[in-house]
Image (spheres, grey):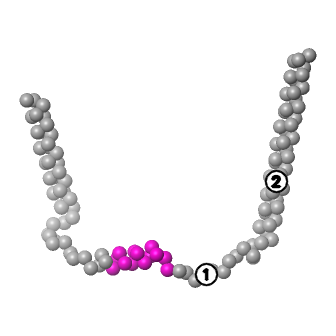
Amino acid sequence: MGSQRGRYDRRVRRLIKIALIALGIRWFLRWRKRRRERAELEPAATVTPVAPAEPDPADELRQKLAESRGDEPEPVDAELAPEEAVEDRRAAVHEQGRAALDEMSSADES
């Protein structure tokens, strides 16, 4: 008799779950329908008049930055192109790295 009771409980629980899901779907569909109806009735009321544009603080800062950069002097070494300056710095860094590696390897050998 206990096994039949368990089957009954399972069937009731399953029926309750199906009923709750159906109610949830019904509620959702009604909510969506009301929302759409409200949106169709209120489009003119939701349009707000455009306020006069306030100056954007970011634009003001960009303008100030551009003005301050316009007053910078030209680089002193006009003959040296930026790519050449980068290549020279890169070569110097590689040279320092190789010297440090040589020092480490000579310290390991001793």
Q: Residue at x 86, y 37 (%)?
A: 16
The magenta span reads 55-67
Question: Which residue has dot 2 on it?
Answer: 29
SS label for mark 2:
helix
Q: In this figure, which residue is indicated by the disc labeled 1?
A: 51
Image x and y of residue 1, in percent: 92, 16
Q: Nearer the viewer, residue 1 or 32?
A: 1
Residue 19 higher or lower than 66, as above or below: above
Q: How far across and down, in percent of the image, does residue 93 sit?
A: 17, 51
Q: Earlier in the sequence, mark 1 or mark 2?
A: 2
- The residue at the far bottom in this view is 52
| Number of the front mark, 1 or 2 | 1
- Distance from the alpha carbon under mark 1 to that under mark 2: 37 Å
Give the quarter of the figure containing the C terminus. Answer: top left
Dot 2 surroundings within 10 Å: few (below 14), some, or many (20 or more)? few
Is residue 58 covered in magenta? yes
Query: Looking at the image, is 12 positioned above or below residue 94?
Result: above
Which residue is at 14% across, 37% downward?
104
The percent position of residue 40, horizontal first and vertical second, equals 79, 69
